[in-house]
Amino acid sequence: PRFILADEPIASLDPMNAQVVMDTLRRIHDEDGRMVIANLHTLDTARRYCDRVIGMRDGRIVFDGTPDQLTTGVARDIYGADDSFNERATSTAIPADTAYADAMLA
């Protein structure tokens, strides 16, 4: 296929397996040149793996930009949150263990 549609590919996965899945999707994109469209709900994952982020709210695009442009303020707009929204409280980021991911994919 020319592109892969990954609908919530890491939903309900533990952080290590989520990393393996996302590393695999990134590798497919980088090595095969296939576009990967993924529906994600964690901003740190979108920042780490995506070249472009599109945020939707109520069926409408409210953000279209690079991961660097995905600020906490933008996240508030996407989720309709007020100033009490703390992105760090929802972070799933863990240190990368690429050796483990590579061994799992070998």
Image (tube, rainbow, N blue to C red):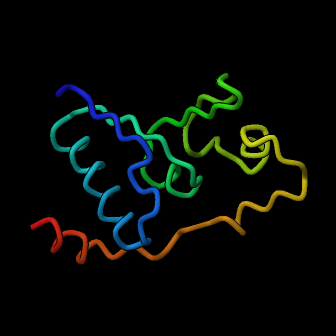
| Residue drawn 59% across the image and 52% down it | 43
| Residue drawn 28% across the image and 48% down it | 25
Task: Pinpoint residue 23: horizontal percent, then vertical percent.
Answer: 30, 58
Task: Pinpoint residue 19: horizontal percent, then vertical percent.
Answer: 36, 65
- Using the image as rendered, state which of residue 31 and residue 58 is in the foreground: 58
* Image quadrant where one finds the C terminus: bottom left
| Residue drawn 25% across the image and 55% down it | 24
In the image as oriented, which residue stretches furthest toward the right?
83
Is residue 82 left or right of 78 when viewed as pictured?
A: right
In the image as oriented, which residue stretches furthest toward the front?
12
In the image as oriented, which residue stretches furthest toward the left?
106
Residue 45, above or below 37: below
The quarter of the picture where residue 89 lies is bottom right
In the image as oriented, which residue stretches furthest toward the top?
60
- Using the image as rendered, state which of residue 10 and residue 3 is in the foreground: 10
- Using the image as rendered, state which of residue 86 and residue 52 is in the foreground: 86
| Residue drawn 81% across the image and 40% down it | 80
The quarter of the picture where residue 6 lies is top left
Q: How many marks overall?
A: 0
Is residue 9 left or right of 86 when viewed as pictured?
A: left
Task: Pinpoint residue 71: horizontal percent, then vertical percent.
Answer: 70, 47
* Image quadrant where one finds the N terminus: top left
Task: Pinpoint residue 75: horizontal percent, then vertical percent.
Answer: 72, 45
Is residue 31 left or right of 46 when viewed as pictured?
A: left
The quarter of the picture where residue 84 lies is bottom right
